[in-house]
């Protein structure tokens, strides 16, 4: 009862509402209705903006590699096809956002503020674990109201490259590799088969790009371009892989 | 603490959430129809709004139709709202919500600008709008296209009712957004000249007006550059009311008069009564 209160599209199971934004009025309408004027009222007033998404983060010796697709949807319409889901929280701490666009943007901005303040108090770069705990604190306290699946990744002096997963519900766990979003279900097998501990930065980048391409190919809510970033002691390096440059796989 | 305030009201807003997915409004509608009345339809701006970043600034465009259900409530409403001298905002969704939200942020931004002693930035307006809309969890039905020029150059944001924003070179919102976006995706180029940008926005809004039932009437434009703002209302009267070609009135003399007879009628005054009006 509690988890499905707002009836928004969730990450793990993409609930496809049986209607289309611009369909003629004759079509039977299943699901909730705010008002009966459905022909004049577009999807975005009834459906919240969701980052359908595939996100991924990998640790390597000396840093982390993070990646995400670039699609944001309101129902069946792609509201933004070049979204940047790799959000800067601090100089060397980033987060990958999946779930409700509004919820994750709001949480990320609040955590960035809290972490910035904390860092000034400390007079030191903050720890990735601190950032992850701040995310967890908000995501767990307001778990009934929020739909947010977040991967926190970055580099700090104490523990080097780290990836923390804060899925819906507000759990916190550190993992060497983590995937998230609606498209992640399609690449668990690929990850289990192809990830090996002890890869270097370039190998991680290739693995992430390949995994995201596969997920984007199969998941309707993921697509666009692949955004990659690597975070290490040297700094943050960002890359974009456009649609035509993605690695190609084919079953036939 | 700042973040505390946000979540405090957050919690309050959710104290009346029902355990099913039906919203308060839907429940009210059901209850009202049981008694035999209908809930008043909120006036919505069916709408096509859009914005484009060009070489020297931004161009914002909007249609001018406001609907109440299936009826056009206002044939020439103004959907491009003033936020600050260098920032304007187009609004789609519930007309009252867009009007009041933009006015509130405009007021707060003016106070902020006086406090900082600087021209306000588009990013600031964006933050204020998104934080307010997020606080109301989508119940304020305002979908906005925010554009302006500040010390960091031209900026364009789209803001959704639930509080998510996107920073892009071209955006469309409203029921006609798909039609307008089709035009943009075909013809947008980075670093356009002002005239090309105005023509592109005009064509995008026209696509919304002629292909979407919720949009209509005229096309308003607002061109914002570093030096000036050009609020063109209307830029294009795409739907001028037709002029009648004929008249049903017949001229005197069309029918010939043969005879005329005048008979005075005598009236007898039977009773006269005076009732004073209560003007106290």
Image (cartoon, coloured by chain):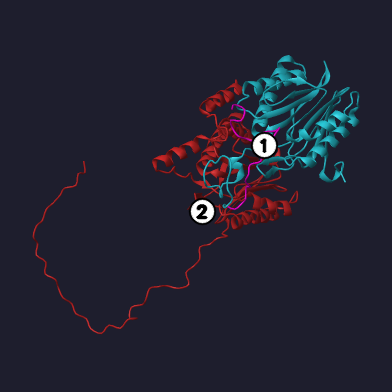
Chain colours: A cyan, B red
In magenta, the rendered stretch is A1-24
The percent position of residue B169, horizontal first and vertical second, equals 71, 45
- Tell me the CA gap for discs 1 and 2: 34 Å
Between A54 and B30, the one nearer to me in the picture: B30
Instruction: Identify the image quadrant of the N terminus of chain B.
Output: top right
The residue wearing badge 1 is A50
The percent position of residue A82, horizontal first and vertical second, equals 74, 41
Other residues around mark 1 within 10 Å, as few (<14) / some (14–19) / many (≥20): many
Between A112 and B230, the one nearer to me in the picture: A112
- Determine whether the residue tagged by mark 2 lies in a helix, strand or loop: loop
Q: Which labelled disc corresponds to residue B76?
A: 2
Q: Is residue B11 left or right of residue A233?
A: left
Q: Residue at 78% x, 41% y: name it.
A: A218
| For residue B240, above or below residue A246 | below
The percent position of residue B211, horizontal first and vertical second, equals 61, 56
* Badges 1 and 2, same chain: no
The percent position of residue B137, horizontal first and vertical second, equals 57, 32
- Determine whether the residue tagged by mark 1 lies in a helix, strand or loop: strand
Q: Chain of mark 1?
A: A
Other residues around mark 2 within 10 Å, as few (<14) / some (14–19) / many (≥20): some
Between B233 and B74, the one nearer to me in the picture: B74
- Location of residue A103 (image quadrant): top right
Query: Can residue A187 be seen by looking at this rendering?
Result: yes
Q: Is residue B44 left or right of residue A243?
A: left
| For residue B270, above or below residue A115 | below
Instruction: Identify the image quadrant of the C terminus of chain B.
Output: top left
């Amino acid at each position: 009862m509690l988890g499905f209160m707002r009836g928004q599209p969730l990450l793990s199971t993409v609930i496809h509402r049986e209607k289309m934004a611009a369909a003629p009025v004759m079509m039977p309408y299943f699901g909730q209705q705010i008002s009966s004027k459905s022909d004049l009222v577009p999807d975005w007033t009834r459906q919240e903006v969701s980052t359908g998404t595939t996100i991924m983060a990998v640790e390597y010796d000396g840093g982390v590699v993070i990646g995400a697709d670039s699609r944001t949807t309101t129902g069946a319409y792609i509201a933004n096809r070049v979204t940047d889901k790799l959000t800067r929280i601090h100089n060397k701490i980033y987060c990958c956002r999946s779930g409700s666009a509004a919820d994750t943007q709001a949480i990320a901005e609040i955590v960035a503020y809290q972490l910035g303040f904390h860092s000034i108090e400390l007079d030191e770069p903050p720890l990735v674990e601190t950032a992850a705990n701040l995310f967890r604190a908000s995501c767990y306290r307001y778990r009934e109201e929020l739909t947010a699946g977040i991967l926190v990744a970055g580099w700090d002096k104490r523990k080097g490259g780290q990836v923390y997963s804060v899925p819906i519900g507000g759990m916190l766990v550190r993992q060497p590799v983590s995937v998230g979003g609606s498209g992640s279900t399609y690449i668990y097998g690929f990850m289990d088969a192809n990830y090996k501990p002890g890869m270097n930065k370039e190998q991680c980048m290739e693995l992430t790009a390949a995994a995201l391409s596969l997920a984007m190919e199969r998941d309707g809510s993921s697509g666009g371009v692949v955004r990659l970033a690597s975070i290490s002691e040297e700094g943050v390096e960002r890359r974009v892989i456009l649609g035509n440059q993605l690695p190609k796989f084919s079953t036939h | 603490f700042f973040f505390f305030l946000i979540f405090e009201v957050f919690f309050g807003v959710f104290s009346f959430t029902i355990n099913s997915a039906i919203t308060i409004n839907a429940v009210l509608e059901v209850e009202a129809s049981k008694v035999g009345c209908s809930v008043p339809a909120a006036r919505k701006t069916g709408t096509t709004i859009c914005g484009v970043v060009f070489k020297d600034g931004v161009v914002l465009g909007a249609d001018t139709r406001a609907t109440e259900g299936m009826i056009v409530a206002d044939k020439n409403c103004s959907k491009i709202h003033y936020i600050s001298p260098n920032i304007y905002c187009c609004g789609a969704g519930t007309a009252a919500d867009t009007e009041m939200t933009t006015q509130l942020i405009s007021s707060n931004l003016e106070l902020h600008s006086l406090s900082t002693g600087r021209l306000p930035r588009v990013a600031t307006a964006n933050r204020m709008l998104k934080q307010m809309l997020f606080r109301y969890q989508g119940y304020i039905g305002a979908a906005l296209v925010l554009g302006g020029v500040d010390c960091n150059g031209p900026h364009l944001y789209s803001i959704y009712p639930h509080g998510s924003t996107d920073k892009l070179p071209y955006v469309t919102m409203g029921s006609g957004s798909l039609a307008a976006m089709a035009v943009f995706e075909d013809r947008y180029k980075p670093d356009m000249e002002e005239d090309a940008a105005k023509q592109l926005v005009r064509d995008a809004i026209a696509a919304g007006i002629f292909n979407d039932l919720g949009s209509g009437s005229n096309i308003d434009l607002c061109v914002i550059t570093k030096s000036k703002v050009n609020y063109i209302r209307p830029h294009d009267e795409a739907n001028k009311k037709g002029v009648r070609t004929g008249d049903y009135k017949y001229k005197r003399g069309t029918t010939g008069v043969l005879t005329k007879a005048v008979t005075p009628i005598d009236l007898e005054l039977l009773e006269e009564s005076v009732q004073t009006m209560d003007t106290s």
